[in-house]
Image (spheres, helix red, strand yellow):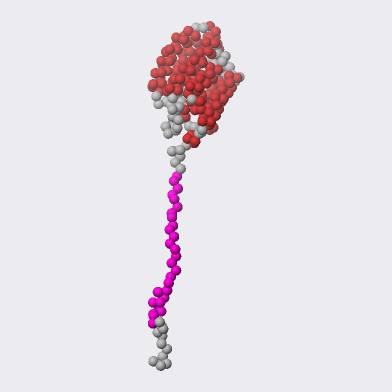
Amino acid sequence: MPGILCQTNPAGHNPELMTDLQPTSIEPSTTVTPPEAEVPFDHAAHSWEQDESPATLFLRALSTLLAGGFLVWAQHRAPINPGMEWNRWIWLSVTANFLLPLGMVWMFFGQGLSHLDWLPHQKYNAWSYGWNFREWRRHLKIALILFAVMLPVLWFASRNPETRAYYQSYFPALDGPLALPLLLLSLVIYMFCWEWFHRGFLLFGIAQGVGPIVAIILQAVVFGAAHYGKPGLEFYSAFAGGLILGGVCWREKSFVPAFLTHAFIHIAWAILVLF
């Protein structure tokens, strides 16, 4: 109609509809990949022992041998007269034959004393350092057999006047009703520390780097050297005794048979030479 402005779109389209028909920009699709979940490190399945090289094991064996030799030398040179200062002598053994080697195992070697089945190289089983009491009944039987074999030798050696004189001045005087029980108890403590040192720390520590055969021989050499200054028969037989006890303890993977054997021998020896 004249005079009326036509509001109709020239193209004849609805503006709203045209708006809907406007092309829209389509963003390229991007796939968001979630980060991979971190797998926690399983410390129980992997340990530093699995990364050790033969050189590391050899150096630990060498350190064990050198430390053992030094501790034996230090005890031999200690200005202590066992007969006059028996308690100090026992405490020296506890420190040098047990506490210091134990500290080396824990602090410097990073190894506990418990037997760990998942560790490698179990053909040597050296990681336990002989700390195995599970088969104590079997080890007691072994010790009693070895002690029975040694008893006639002990009796024969105790009849030697020079040997008796040496040990009567070596052991403390028995003055009082409790003197003998305390002496025998201290000998058990002494032998516990002594045998773990030789047939635990030295034997199993050295075997980690050079194997059991060489370890048995070397600990027997140190064991024999520790008897330097004792009566001749005892000094020379100590090497053979060290070999026998070392072989038994390696076979049993425990120092307990040697400890029980040596404890029985020392108790009987003290009685034989003092009475």
Name which quarter of the figure residue 231 lies in.
top right
Q: Quadrant of residue 251?
A: top left
Note whether residue 179 is visible: no
Q: Position of residue 218 (x, y in %)?
A: 52, 21
Q: Residue at x 58, y 21 (%)?
A: 73
Provide residue 33's location: percent of width, then percent of height.
43, 55
Q: Residue furthest front?
A: 11
**Vertical position of residue 48 compared to residue 266: above or below:** below
Side of 94 where 2 appears, left or right: left
Q: Nearer the viewer, residue 82 or 102?
A: 102
- Examine the rendered structure and indicate whether residue 36 appears above or below residue 90: below
**Front residue of 92 and 148:** 148
The residue shown at (45%, 23%) is 250
Which quadrant holds the N terminus? bottom left
Specify the farthest residue to the bottom: 2
Residue 150 seen anywhere in this rendered image of the structure: yes
Does the segment drawn in magenta span residue 24?
yes
Is residue 65 a member of the stretch shown in magenta?
A: no
Residue occupying image coordinates x 54% and y 10%: 232
Number of marks drawn: 0
Which residues lie in the magenta part?
12-40
At which x and y percent is residue 213?
Answer: 48, 22
* Dominant secondary structure of the residues highlighted in magenta in the image: loop
With respect to residue 5, does 269 lie above or below?
A: above
Between 91 and 120, the one nearer to me in the picture: 120
Residue that appears at 41% across and 21% down: 139
Q: Nearer the viewer, residue 103 or 28?
A: 28
Question: Could you say where residue 46 lies in the image, as x and y percent from the top left?
Answer: 45, 38
Left or right, 226 with respect to 261, comes to right
